[in-house]
Amino acid sequence: MKQYFKHYAESELGVGTAYMEVTDGWPSRQVEVYGETWRWGDEAHNKYLADQPFEVLELGEEHEISVEEFERAWQEALKRSESLEWSAQTEARLMAAGWHKGRRDTRRVARWRQKLETPNGFRMSMAAEKALEEFGGLRVDCKGPGLACARGGFDVDPELASGEEDRFGDFRDQVGSDLFPLGEAYNGEVFLAIDGIGRVYLLGDRIQLAGTSIYSALDSILVGRLPRDIAGA
């Protein structure tokens, strides 16, 4: 069972606000906001994740918030931290393809939702919606040697995965979340998929983590950073 909370926070950065997701009695994701400084933690990146059980955290009903409010804070934290890490070269390529800060193509995303969401098909999460609003419709061609593997390009168009619902569903247990298509990468060799908390994967005969957010994933593809294998995949 998941619960979501917002509460007062205090650290070496001063006084701020914390947002917390609790799963089966333990913190599983956390965002802290101190003025213009945002930081986040999850079970894989636990430097800023509380390590005590929920029962000792002194959080009550008055601190509870909706999953939507938490996800907005989570996506903003990822955006602020990861966007600082992508290269100037990546930003230049994205801008040449039509991206700009604040880009938000809601009409295109609404059309994709209507076409791809069916009773037995894909379900668009808030993370997928935000990623597609900002990057949907962009195509970047890239090749050549990269930092650790070949550079690649991508085409952010979820309709490219139309009819692949079963393939995406096969990997649900490995990542612990439903997956929604974002498009293709590496000249159509793999699909791009995003889970419910914004992590982005390369999906083909196996599944690999491209980045903990859409920002780090696109950067990794363009600069040639190795994806991470998923246990059990």
Image (tube, helix red, strand yellow):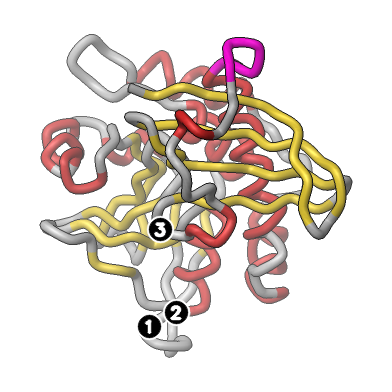
Place residue 122 in its image quadrant.
top left
Report the residue marked by disc 1: 150
Drawn side of residue 163 relative to residue 21, left or right: left
| Magenta span of residues | 60-66
Report the residue marked by disc 2: 224
Crowding at mark 1 (Cα within 10 Å: few <14, some 14-19, many 20+)? some
Q: Earlier in the sequence, mark 1 or mark 3?
A: 3
Dots 1 and 2: beta carbons under 8 Å? yes
Q: What secondary structure is found at the residue carrying circle 3? A: loop
Report the residue marked by disc 3: 44
Dots 2 and 3: beta carbons under 8 Å? no
The N terminus lies in which quarter of the figure?
Answer: top left
| Residue at point 59%, 24% (across, down) | 59
Residue nearest the observer in this picture, 199 or 65: 65
Crowding at mark 2 (Cα within 10 Å: few <14, some 14-19, many 20+)? many
Q: CA distance from mark 2 to mark 3?
A: 22 Å
Q: What amino acid is labelled 3 in the image? A: Ala
Vertical placement of residue 128 versus 112, above or below: below
Say whether residue 41 is magenta.
no
Q: Earlier in the sequence, mark 2 or mark 3?
A: 3
Q: What secondary structure is found at the residue carrying circle 2? A: loop
Image location of residue 15, percent across then percent down: 85, 43
Q: What amino acid is labelled 2 in the image? A: Gly
User: Which-is-in-front pick, marks 1 and 3?
Assistant: 3
Q: CA distance from mark 1 to mark 2?
A: 5 Å
Residue nearest the observer in this picture, 178 or 155: 178
Residue nearest the observer in this picture, 79 or 184: 79
